[in-house]
Amino acid sequence: MTTKKMEAERKYECHRCWVEMNKEEVETFGPNIVIDVCPKCQGIWLDKDELGKLLKDRKLTNYLTKHIGTKSRSPMVCPKCGNTMDIEKADDIEVDVCLTCGGVWLDQGELDALKSKSEEGFKGDELAKQEELEEEQRYKRRNSPLHRFLGKLSR
Ligand SMILES: [Zn+2]
Ligand SMILES: [Zn+2]
């Protein structure tokens, strides 16, 4: 409980502008959530699962945050855990997803773009997703069950 509360109050820095981000409460389809917004570039940081609360369509959220592969294609580092991020595409919208903690970085305007996309009923590029899924599976095979077990413990 305590850890969770501390986590919610922790301030993040925008890893584009290096300024502290502001906490903003936003309405969702469920209870309101607090997200982090950069006062300079208006980028948004969403913890894992927060994107799912903002978008009506689960398919789009799953597409962007599940099976994201293991290779980093983004120059950005995660504002939360400092690990590498990957770029995930929903058609023309490119978002950065952390390979480690599953958080999502959205540039200004991308949240609205994703919202309208999810309302349109997003299908996704199954072929591209399949490649990332295979990449993930290859990675898992390279890691022994013991490694995976230890990985889970440190999470
Ligand atoms: Zn910024
Ligand atoms: Zn992270």
Image (cartoon, rainbow, N blue to C red):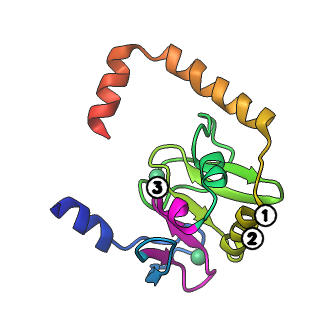
Asked if marks 1 and 3 touch (Cβ < 8 Å), the reply is: no
**Where residue 113 sits in the image (x, y, percent)?**
74, 70
Residue occupying the point 32% across, 16% down: 146
Q: Residue at (67%, 53%) from the top-left corner?
A: 60
Ligand 1 quarter of the rendering: bottom right
Residue 112 percent across, percent down from the top left = 70, 75
User: How many numbered marks, from 0 up?
Assistant: 3
- For the N terminus, the image quarter is bottom left
- Circle 2 residues within 10 Å: few <14, some 14–19, many ≥20: some
* Mark 3, other Cα within 10 Å: few <14 / some 14–19 / many ≥20: some
Callout 1: 10 Å neighbours few (<14), some, many (20+)? few
- Residue 48 image label: 3
State the separation of the CA atoms marked 2 and 1.
Answer: 6 Å
Given contact means CB atoms under 8 Å apart, are the residues at marks 2 and 1 in contact? Answer: yes
- Tell me the kind of residue under disc 2: Ser
- Residue closer to the observer: 64 or 17: 64
Is residue 151 highlighted in magenta? Answer: no
Label 1 sits on residue:
120
Q: Which mark is residue 116?
A: 2
Front one among 110 and 99: 110
What SS does tag 3 mark?
A: loop
Quadrant of res 44: bottom right
What is the C-alpha distance between the residues marked 2 and 3?
A: 20 Å
Q: Classify residue 47 as left or right of residue 87.
A: left
